[in-house]
Amino acid sequence: MTATTGWVCQVCWKWNRPEDDPCFKCKSPRGLVDDAEVEAQRKVLEAKAAEPEPVPDIVVAVPVWVFRGYARVWLRGGIGLLGLLALMALGGVTDLIWFALTAGFSAALVVCGFLAGEVADGMRNREVWAFITGIALSVVAVIGSITAFSVFAPGLVNPAAVRWGSLIVFGGAGVAAAGGLFLLIRAGRRAAA
Ligand SMILES: [Zn+2]
């Protein structure tokens, strides 16, 4: 990677676009090379993280909590499935399509889990994109969960029950994200007026 394609923040290790300065995530200045400076920036970040929530309202707290939970469960599920895949590969793959399906599903879980973690962080900072991504993610999760059940365990659970269960579990997260977005925009309007 060259300097024209982006840079990595020395404080939080996030990847930044070339035009980002300071870091989009932690607002540390670009080009910190001195260890003491990096350490000082990290201290500032830690102090900020230890502070109480700026406006501790439940409507932001609920989606943050929900998406943090998803992030943990999805990441663990995806990594667990990857382990299973490794065992399958060692034992000799008999059904390539099945193997590819499981691999795709576990990769999707890891990606969604990672994304949900980013979304929870963004929501905590009241960033609009995080709420929008959260809504999209919950739609994907409803579809993904229904599809996963019909592909991996057809007939195990009543399809109607799967549909309703997915809709309640993940649709609820979407509603929480939408509610947070609505209040965020309303608060922004009030601040602007
Ligand atoms: Zn950073």
Image (tube, rainbow, N blue to C red):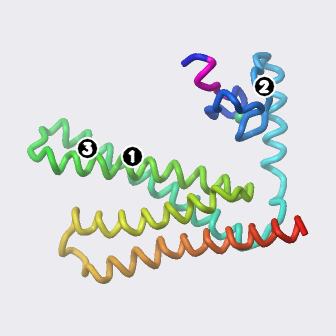
In this rendering, would 137 be left or right of 159? right
Disc 2 residue type?
Answer: Val
Magenta stretch: residue 27 in it?
A: no
In the rendered image, which quarter contains the N terminus?
A: top right
Ligand 1 - quadrant of the structure image:
top right
Secondary structure, mark 1, is: helix
**Residue 52 placed where, x, y %?**
83, 58
| Magenta segment | 3-8
Res 58 → quadrant: bottom right
Residue 73 vs 164, above or below: the answer is: above
Residue highlighted by disc 1? 79
**Residue 168 placed where, x, y %?**
46, 79
Residue at 34 percent across and 78 percent down: it is: 163
Spatial CA distance of label 1 from label 2 is 32 Å
Residue highlighted by disc 3? 85
Residue at 64 percent across and 56 percent down: it is: 129
